[in-house]
Amino acid sequence: MDWDNLRYFLEVARCQRISLAAQRLGVQHSTVARRIQALEQELGLRLFHKSTVSGYSLTSEGLNLQQRMEPVESRLLAARDAITGKARPLTGKLRLGCTEAFGSYVLTPLLSIFQTQYPELTLELLPVPRPISLSRRDADLAIALERPQRGPYWCTRLADYSLRLYAHQDYLNAHPPIESVQDLSQHRFIAYVDDLVFSDSLRYLEEIVRSAAVRFRSTSVIAQYQATLQGQGIAVLPCFLAKTDPRLRCVLPDQVELRRRFWMFCHEEQRQNPSLTRLWHFLKQSVEERQDLLDGV
């Protein structure tokens, strides 16, 4: 495949507008459209749904291509920096906002590695159980459960991850055995506070068991994790948080699994920030290398 065609494809996939992609790439609108058409013809696939209202949204084939090509792009940029000597010291401050558990248990170790490479750069991490607003300048870079629907943002899919049911062994020993999803009706659960859930994608129990008997609720997934360790009940937890803890047992591992997605995005003007773009590509590559952890393998 022609890499230039792929480069144009990735830009359109991120901004969902041919005109904006052309502006970012410094070329004519017609050049971008021609490149996309050439790539679709080369692959024999339709990569975008085209709409005058919503712009260029990825088809399932387009999303698959984006997921495979962005890690390649990250490696090419890293190689370019290494060869040309552009990997010079970075200074200043970057603030990264993200979901609570992912920020605490996955990003913090990665950011420590990044900072050993760029010790003069100050990093601020905001792992919070609420949305991060880039429009209010809460952060320079955000990782969230939903892709922003509008705004001048540079956005990419960061990773998919798995969630499963977990409980402490003491809880399981003291309650009826669980051999099927139907048995869950006899048990108590730990979950989010219904009227304070900041994303519908966090309403896990509704997908698993109806009218679940929830005895402990919290806006914090880390608080839910701690309540599970205390034997308060069964919780839906990210595998990257719970699977590594030997005190917890996965409940119905062959029958219950949920999948969610992390999106990474920043304000368009931040693309000119060398520190942010370096961190962006570092996280893309590093998170991809830890996909097994996110999948709970």
Image: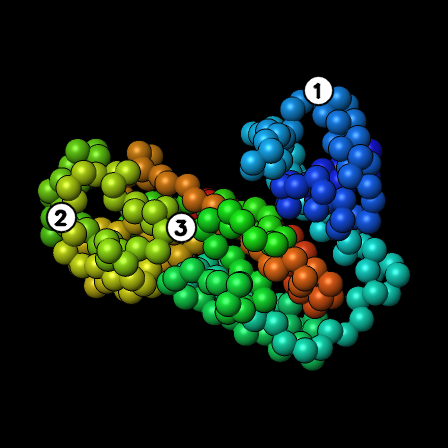
Q: Which mark is residue 266?
A: none
Q: Secondary structure beneath disc 1? A: loop
How many other residues sit within 10 Å of disc 3, few (<14), some (14-19) or many (≥20)? many
Would you say 199 lies left or right of 22 here? left
- Give residue 39's position: percent from left, percent from top: 76, 28
Tell me the kind of residue under disc 3. Answer: Cys
**Secondary structure under the numbered disc 2 in the rendered image:** strand
> Relative to residue 9, is residue 125 depicted above or below?
below
Disc 3 designates what residue?
239
**Where in the figure is residue 55, as x and y percent of width and height?**
60, 37
- The residue singled out by tag 2 in the image is 213
Query: In x, y percent, where is residue 263?
Result: 53, 50
Q: Visible in this render: residue 141?
A: yes
Position of 185 with respect to 53 (left or right) is left
Question: Looking at the rendering, which quadrant does residue 121 occupy?
Answer: bottom right
Q: Residue at x 70, y 71 (%)?
A: 117
Q: Earlier in the sequence, mark 2 or mark 1?
A: 1
Residue picked out by circle 1: 44
For the residues marked 2 and 3, what is the alpha-carbon distance in whole angstroms?
22 Å
In 3D space, how far apart are the residues under numbered discs 2 and 1 (Cα atoms)?
51 Å
